[in-house]
């Protein structure tokens, strides 16, 4: 089994690339995880149950050695970033538990996290002004995306230091077409085969 997780701030091209991976690599399942608008204790409970259920499913598939490939358009890392920036609840301890579960799963399953970035503010602005679905009270702006991106940098730096069974790949998307970035991700996927 192989799991590829596409992560990064809004405007980095995750969803477009996730669809391309699903369409072009045979026997790939695309999962586009939802974001929850609920907040407070009820919101935290809902999110914890949601991600623990997904992790249980993948742990079961890993145990039976299921020969499958999954592309995740975001995962609980996004919840970690967005809860820190925009929610009232604290997701940090849940994040650590989920990282441990994912790292444990990585003993039997290939796990690649692809962190997409964009540094050019003008390019990011152009990407954000395209037709995007808003995320609750998150304002679409270059400043917000850069703030999210900085949190992802810190998050994945810590992940790389503390969890050896999760592979982190950072890809700058500045000045690249989706096809250019797709080719880099495809190389990561093919290396895992």
Image (cartoon, rainbow, N blue to C red):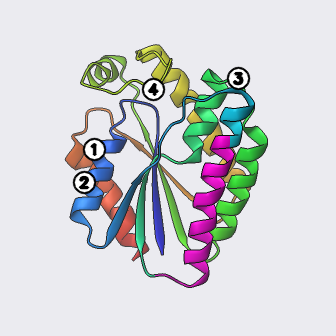
Mark 2 falls on what kind of element?
helix
Question: Against 113, is 123 above or below?
Answer: above
Residue 4 visible here: yes
Q: Taking 30 as reference, is 8 left or right?
A: right
State the separation of the CA atoms marked 1 and 3. Answer: 30 Å
Q: Residues within 10 Å of mark 1 (few under 14, many from 20)?
A: few
Please say whether residue 14 is one of the residues in the magenta stretch: no
Question: Against 120, is 183 above or below?
Answer: below
Q: Residue at x 70, y 58 (%)?
A: 163
State the separation of the CA atoms marked 4 and 1. Answer: 17 Å
Proximity of marks 2 and 1: CB atoms separated by less than 8 Å: yes
Please name the residue that numbered disc 3 is placed on: 88
State the separation of the CA atoms marked 2 and 1. Answer: 6 Å
Please name the residue that numbered disc 1 is placed on: 16
State which tag comes first along the sequence, 1 or 3: 1
Mark 4 falls on what kind of element?
loop
Which tag is nearer the camera, tag 4 or tag 1?
Answer: 4
Proximity of marks 2 and 3: CB atoms separated by less than 8 Å: no
State which tag comes first along the sequence, 4 or 2: 2
Please name the residue that numbered disc 4 is placed on: 135
């Amino acid at each position: 089994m192989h799991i590829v997780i596409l992560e990064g701030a809004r405007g980095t091209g995750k969803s477009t690339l996730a669809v391309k991976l699903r369409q072009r690599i045979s026997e790939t399942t695309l999962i586009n995880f939802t974001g929850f608008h609920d907040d407070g204790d009820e919101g935290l409970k809902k999110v914890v149950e949601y991600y623990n259920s997904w992790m249980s499913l993948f742990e079961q598939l890993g145990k039976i050695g299921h020969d499958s490939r999954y592309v995740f358009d975001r995962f609980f890392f996004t919840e970690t970033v967005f809860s820190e920036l925009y929610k009232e609840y604290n997701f940090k301890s849940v994040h650590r538990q989920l990282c441990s579960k994912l790292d444990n799963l990585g003993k039997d399953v290939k796990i690649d996290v692809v962190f997409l970035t964009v540094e050019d503010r003008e390019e990011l602005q152009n990407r954000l002004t395209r037709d995007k679905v808003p995320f609750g009270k998150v304002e679409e702006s270059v400043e917000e995306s850069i703030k999210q991106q900085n949190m992802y940098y810190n998050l994945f730096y810590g992940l790389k230091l503390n969890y050896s069974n999760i592979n982190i790949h950072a890809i700058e998307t500045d000045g690249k077409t989706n096809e250019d970035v797709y080719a880099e991700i495809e190389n990561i996927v093919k290396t895992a085969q």
